[in-house]
Image (spheres, rainbow, N blue to C red):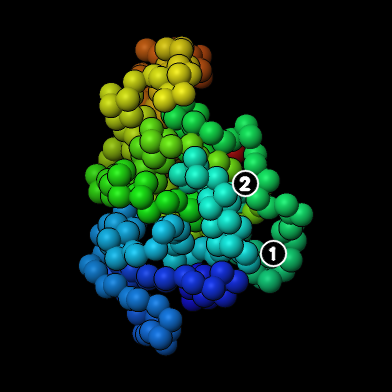
């Protein structure tokens, strides 16, 4: 329960801790019950991260909301630094930070000891701050476990979209970016623990990353509330990248038809054209695809 402990040991004096048990099958719930004097526990059938966060949002009473996932860890002073920043910057609706990825190859204490501590963790990282809509169309800048958002903004944006098995957080930050400024602070506020069974590494029946982008473009278009506007060539590149990455992941994991369709989309967008053409040929028939896999195993 390092995740819960990392929240409870924050130095901010007034934290409401809501833990959503999303249908766990281990002894997590029993362990959580040892914290019952300090946390509120919500139990539900397994519905995924979006539903779990929504349950927490519905129960939250504070002025600000922050998220932490079951495997991940908040670093000391995260809450204090972010609350102080939002209190002194009323024009900012959400602040976030950098994070570190822990692959569990070394002990957590050793890993944490090597994370640099910024002298001014609340310093603004200007190039990743402000009206971020157009930048968020390219990629998700905000790691959920580092974010703190005003509850008023959450109530206006609404809940996480249950239609996304993955990418629901990216979709949410895009929706937030239509309403307010989002600021990145220089501190490192969280540790993301790598899970080899993570759903982000699987080949899903839908290209959720692509769906997030196309949904945003349909709803909001190319222009940021600040007036900045993307070129169509930029949009085509972002679309192509999503097709390519989804297709490549499908290709190496045995989903030939999904890969073939994705690489054909890359060709239409002229994204990494020659490489996409090469992979399209590989995935065009069972014979060429089987030869590719045979060569891959021999490398």
How crowded is the residue under tag 2: few (<14 C-alpha within 10 Å), some, or many (20+)? many
Q: Say if residue 119 shows up in the picture.
A: yes
At 74% from the left edge and 66% from the top edge, which residue is drawn?
A: 113
Quarter placement of the C terminus? top right
Residue at 30% from the left image edge and 50% from the top image edge? 155
116 vs 61, nearest the viewer = 61
Q: Give the label, 2 or 1, closer to the camera.
A: 2
The answer to whether residue 262 is left or right of residue 84 is left
Which residue occupies the foreground of this view, 121 or 243? 121
Question: What is the x, y in percent for residue 81?
Answer: 61, 58
Query: Is 295 positioned to the left or the right of 18 in the image?
Result: right
Residue 296 in view of the camera: no
Name the element at disc 2. strand
In the figure, residue 255 lies in which quadrant? top left
Circle 1: element type = helix
Residue 30 is situated, as x and y percent measured from the top left of the image, at 36, 85
Real-space Cα distance between discs 2 and 1? 21 Å
What residue is at 40 percent from the left and 78 percent from the top?
39
Tell me if residue 19 comes above or below residue 194 in the rendering. Answer: below
Residue 284 coordinates in the image, percent (x, y): 34, 22
Q: Looking at the image, do the residues carrying marks 2 and 1 touch, with CB atoms under 8 Å apart? A: no
Q: Which residue is mark 2?
A: 185
Give the mark count: 2
Q: Which x, y percent locates residue 228? A: 48, 19
| Of callouts 2 and 1, the N-terminal one | 1
- Which residue occupies 39% across, 19% down? 222
Between 192 and 26, the residue placed more toward the observer is 192
Left or right position of 169 against 156:
right
Tell me: residue 38, above or below residue 176: below
Q: Is residue 253 depicted above or below 149 in this figure?
A: above
Residue identifier under label 1: 111
- Write down the quadrant of residue 220 in the picture: top left
């Amino acid at each position: 329960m390092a995740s819960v402990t990392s929240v409870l040991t924050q130095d901010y004096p007034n934290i409401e801790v809501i833990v959503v048990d999303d249908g766990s099958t281990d002894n997590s719930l029993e362990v959580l019950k040892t914290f019952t004097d300090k946390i509120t526990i919500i139990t539900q059938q397994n519905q995924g991260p979006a539903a779990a966060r929504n349950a927490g949002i519905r129960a939250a009473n504070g002025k600000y909301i922050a998220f932490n996932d079951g495997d991940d860890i908040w670093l000391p002073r995260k809450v204090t630094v972010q609350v102080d920043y939002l209190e002194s910057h009323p024009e900012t609706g959400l602040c976030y930070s950098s994070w570190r990825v822990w692959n569990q190859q070394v002990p957590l204490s050793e890993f944490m000891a090597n994370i640099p501590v910024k002298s001014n963790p609340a310093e603004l990282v200007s190039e990743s701050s402000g009206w971020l809509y157009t930048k968020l169309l390219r990629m998700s800048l905000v790691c959920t476990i580092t974010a703190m958002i005003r509850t008023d903004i959450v109530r206006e944006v609404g809940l996480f979209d249950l239609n996304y098995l993955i990418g629901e957080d990216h979709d949410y930050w895009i929706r937030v970016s239509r309403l307010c400024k989002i600021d990145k602070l220089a501190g490192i506020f969280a540790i993301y623990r790598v899970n080899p069974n993570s759903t982000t590494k699987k080949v899903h029946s839908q290209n959720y990353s692509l769906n997030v982008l196309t949904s945003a473009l349909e709803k909001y278009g190319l222009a940021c509330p600040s007036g900045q506007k993307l070129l169509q060539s930029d949009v085509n590149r972002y679309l192509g990248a999503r097709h390519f990455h989804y297709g490549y992941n499908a290709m190496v994991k045995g989903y030939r038809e999904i890969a073939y369709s994705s690489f054909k989309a890359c060709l239409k967008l002229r994204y990494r054209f020659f490489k996409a053409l090469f992979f399209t040929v590989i995935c065009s028939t069972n014979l060429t695809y089987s030869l590719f896999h045979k060569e891959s195993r021999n490398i």
